[in-house]
Image (cartoon, coloured by chain):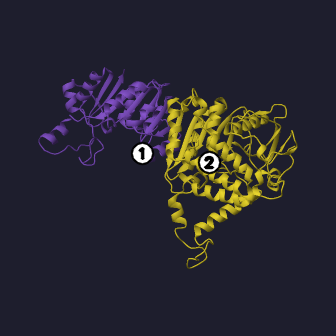
């Protein structure tokens, strides 16, 4: 695995949140880009991926990945099996996001979650003034074929964490170019296109 | 005591290595019997490196043998896993010291029902103790001791070979760095036991079987064994593959024969499978080895919880299944993966899309080769193999 490999900015941000030497599970690991960068920084990283093509690509690259579903297969892992359980851009596509989050924080000491912000100003404009379901760069699907069945805003996610008694260790809000923005919550919920949360029980 | 060989055994032993073990330390079998001395026939490819860290054990399936990558001494056909093992292949003798031994109970040189009981000097036949997958693995471990190999870089096998892989990981976790169970299960299902029973009944219903003592009567239950093979062979394929290969095509005729000859190509194919099998396999061995598979239940041996079999394991696992395999379907392989997850083991799992059924693990499946190649490369890096 090449250590010089460049990965998406939001994935790099997640990778930076993981301490070297720890154990991590990347749920919905896709083609293994984040996994590979974690392995390169001496993290004992494992993956779970729904698509067969993704799993096969990962294993063929020497990564430890199983085919599995965030909604159903996290419960097969014992408590505290990992230091970090990562769910990148997938929470909104799960059937039961609250249960998935609960399982992540049971299996892992920390959870890292990234998701698109449904309260981004473009989304609001399109729905309020366009009268149409929003389609944006981070939410490119039509309403009838979107995998995203449980969309939320950054504030919604904070509320869920409060409700579940989950501690937010870090929250990073990213703009359209995946650069961190530093604004008060009200504004970041308007201008942030996606967010990355580092959570613990 | 071990010398009353069949032709097949004689030919096999002439083309492989063998060791007589257990003279001083008999093998304690699951059934309680102490077996020894016993012979293990095995084949090796490549060379053991200086720190003895590059050994790969290949475990063969029900009717397989030690001739993984060289011509079969009886049939002359290429080795059964030449697609995977050999120079330039995924498991390359230039890199690994590859070992494959005929299983305990087998008929290609390793001690089984064909051998003679040292106590009576008469052939064991059905008096041979019933062996288990764990017993087969014990014999393999004894062979490794004999060869001075402390641990395996990898143990790999499909079907019954996969069962042995799981048993290795459970019985000798410290001796197994990486384990690749392919198209298998942690326990034999009711349906699979049922199919085996049909095969065994076919053998035992053959008047030539003579209570297992056919060699004493200079006969062989070839019809029974052929029927057993024909039944089993159907379970190795898939409905789609049979349809694709044969459909309702007629064999060497243009119209139905209105009789019971092999009208259909599929009948002719199965008859051929049956009749060629009896040339290279022993009927009693077939009884014993199918029984070993029936008895396999790794969870049962660990308090009913499969994860307990892998508790605290440091072995890296790669499990592979095939979409059209209905003998060891994906859900059986996935149950193993779930248990490994529950034991927090390092595990990869891939399901390969194919219509070739259970036999796919023996065939040219590029996706399987890519998976294995990637997994082994990753494991070799961690193990520090060049």
Q: Nearer the viewer, residue B56 or B105?
A: B105
Q: Residue furthest bottom?
A: B254
Task: Please give the name of the residue rendered at 48% of the width and 38% of the height, measured from the top-left corner.
Answer: A65
Residue assigned mark 1? A51
Mark in the foreground, 2 or 1: 1
To the question of a shared chain for discs 2 and 1, the answer is no
Which chain is depicted yellow? B
Element carrying mark 1: loop
Picture disc at residue B178: none
Q: How many discs appear?
A: 2
Q: Is residue A105 visible?
A: yes
Compared across the picture, whether B215 is left or right of B315 comes to right
Where residue A112 appears, as percent x and y from the top left, is 37, 28
Q: Quadrant of the C terminus of chain B?
A: top right
**Residue drawn at the location 56% of the way across and 52% of the way down:** B358
The residue carrying pointer 1 sits among few (fewer than 14), some (14 to 19) or many (20 or more) residues within 10 Å by Cα, namely some
Vertical placement of B97 versus A164: above or below?
below
Q: Is residue A93 above or below residue B201?
A: above
- Determine which of the numbered discs, if any, sits on residue B90 in the image: 2
Image chain in purple = A
Residue B182 relative to residue A86: left or right? right
Residue sitting nearer the eye, A15 or A67 = A67
Which chain letter goes with mark 2? B
Question: Is residue B72 something one can see in this rendering?
Answer: no
Q: Chain of mark 1?
A: A
Q: Position of residue B256 (x, y in %)?
A: 56, 77
């Amino acid at each position: 695995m090449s250590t010089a490999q460049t990965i998406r900015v939001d994935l790099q941000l997640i990778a930076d949140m993981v301490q070297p030497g720890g154990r991590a599970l990347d749920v919905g690991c896709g083609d293994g880009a984040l996994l590979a960068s974690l392995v390169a920084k001496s993290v004992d990283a494992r993956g779970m991926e729904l698509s067969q093509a993704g799993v096969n690509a990962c294993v063929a690259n020497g990564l430890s990945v199983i085919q599995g579903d965030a909604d159903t297969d996290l419960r097969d892992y014992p408590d505290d099996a990992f230091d970090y359980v990562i769910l990148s851009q997938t929470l909104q596509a799960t059937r039961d996001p609250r249960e998935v989050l609960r399982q992540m924080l049971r299996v892992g000491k920390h959870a890292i979650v990234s998701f698109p912000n449904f309260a981004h100003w473009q989304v609001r404009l399109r729905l309020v003034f366009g009268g149409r379901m929003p389609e944006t760069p981070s939410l490119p699907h039509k309403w009838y074929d979107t995998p995203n069945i449980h969309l939320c805003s950054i504030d919604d996610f904070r509320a869920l964490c409060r409700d579940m008694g989950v501690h937010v260790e870090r929250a990073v809000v990213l703009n359209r170019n995946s650069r961190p923005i530093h604004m008060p919550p009200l504004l970041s919920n308007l201008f942030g296109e996606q967010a990355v949360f580092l959570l613990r029980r | 005591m071990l010398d009353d060989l069949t032709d097949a055994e004689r030919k096999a032993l002439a083309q492989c290595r063998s060791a007589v073990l257990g003279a001083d330390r008999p093998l304690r079998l699951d059934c309680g019997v102490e077996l020894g001395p016993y012979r293990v026939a095995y084949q090796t490819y490549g060379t053991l490196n200086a720190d003895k860290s590059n050994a790969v054990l290949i475990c063969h399936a029900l009717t397989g043998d030690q001739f993984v990558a060289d011509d079969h001494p009886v049939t002359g056909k290429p080795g059964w896993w030449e697609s995977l093992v050999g120079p330039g292949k995924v498991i390359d003798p230039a890199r690994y010291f590859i070992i494959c031994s005929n299983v305990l109970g087998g008929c290609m040189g390793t001690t089984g029902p064909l051998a003679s009981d040292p106590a009576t000097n008469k052939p064991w036949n059905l008096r041979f103790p019933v062996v288990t997958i764990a017993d087969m693995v014990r014999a393999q471990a004894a062979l490794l001791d004999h060869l001075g190999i402390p641990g395996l870089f990898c143990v790999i096998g499909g079907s019954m070979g996969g069962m042995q892989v799981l048993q290795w990981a459970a019985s000798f976790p410290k001796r197994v760095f990486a384990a690749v169970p392919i198209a298998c299960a942690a326990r034999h299902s009711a349906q699979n036991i049922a199919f085996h029973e049909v095969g065994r009944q076919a053998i035992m219903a053959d008047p030539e079987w003579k209570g297992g003592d056919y060699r004493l009567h200079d006969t062989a239950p070839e019809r029974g064994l052929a029927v057993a093979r024909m039944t089993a062979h159907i379970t190795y394929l898939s409905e789609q593959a049979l349809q694709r290969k044969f459909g309702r095509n007629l064999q060497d005729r243009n119209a139905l024969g209105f009789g019971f000859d092999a009208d259909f190509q599929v009948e002719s194919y199965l008859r051929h499978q049956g009749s060629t099998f009896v040339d290279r396999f022993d009927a009693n061995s077939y009884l014993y080895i199918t029984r070993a598979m029936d008895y396999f239940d790794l969870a049962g041996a660990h308090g009913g919880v499969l994860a307990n079999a892998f508790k605290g394991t440091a072995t890296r696992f790669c499990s592979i299944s095939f979409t059209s395999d209905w003998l060891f379907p994906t859900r059986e392989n996935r149950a193993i993966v779930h248990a490994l997850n529950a034991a927090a083991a390092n595990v990869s799992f891939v399901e390969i899309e194919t219509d070739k059924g259970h036999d796919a693990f023996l065939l040219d499946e590029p996706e399987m080769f890519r998976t294995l190649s990637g997994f082994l490369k990753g494991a070799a890096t961690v193990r520090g193999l060049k």
